[in-house]
Amino acid sequence: RTICNALELFDVIPRNAGYMNASIRACFPEMPPMVGFALTSTFRSAEQPRTKDVYGSLTQQVEAFASLPGPAVVVFQDVDEPVRAATFGEVMCSTYKGFGAKGIITSGAGRDLDQVRAIGFPAFTGSTICSHAYCQILQVGVPVTVGGLWVENGMLLHGDCNGVTSIPLEIASEVPDACAELAKAEQI
């Protein structure tokens, strides 16, 4: 909420843009905010993969973290309609966290939420599904749409109990001071 209010002061994006809609919610609203750069990927689980190495792209994702200007936030667009199975679980989140990612966002579903909470990894999704079915990461580093927001690889994202917001890089260094001033003004 404060991030969106601060962004309005800069007038660089319309007030009805730059954030994910209500289909994406914090799985763990009690966790502190996450901030990082989007590492985008597409995902599907409804059909059997053509190759046996379904997690091969996981390595590609982790290697791509180094190309970002800071810590990664893994962002998945699930291309199945309707969503068929969980995009993430404990193993994937543990891997991402181990390589420095700050959180995960998906238009798909999650699972292993107790275990993901226990490792302290922020997750944002609209649903949970107990199975991973035929999970496969299709493409890495491509533009995706999640929660109505067009997300490009390397976009700066902030997520907390209120939702997920993109922060334009040209004003990113000014946003923390604007948030502090807004918080001070709200206390009056």
Image (cartoon, rainbow, N blue to C red):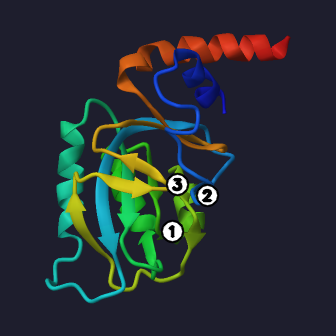
Check if mark 3's residue and mark 1's residue have beta carbons within 8 Å.
Answer: yes
Answer with the quarter of the image where residue 161 lies: top right
Q: Residue 110 carries which label?
A: 1
Check if mark 2's residue and mark 1's residue have beta carbons within 8 Å.
Answer: yes
Q: Which residue is drawn at 64% across and 14% down?
A: 180
Q: Distance between the residues labelled 3 and 1?
A: 8 Å
Residue 12 x %, y %: 46, 22
Q: How far apart are marks 2 and 1 (CA)?
A: 9 Å
Q: Which of 39 and 148 is in front in this view?
A: 148
Q: Is residue 49 left or right of residue 2?
A: left
Check if mark 3's residue and mark 2's residue have beta carbons within 8 Å.
Answer: yes
Q: Is residue 72 left or right of residue 142?
A: right
Local packing at callout 2 (Cα closer than 10 Å; few below 14, some 14-19, many 20+) is: many
Q: Nearer the viewer, residue 149 or 46?
A: 149
Q: Which residue is the extreme one toward the right?
A: 188
Which residue position is annotated with label 3? 123
Q: Distance between the residues labelled 3 and 2?
A: 6 Å
Which residue position is annotated with label 2? 27
Q: Which residue is the extreme one toward the bottom?
A: 48
Q: What residue type is labelled 2?
A: Cys
Residue 94 in sight: no
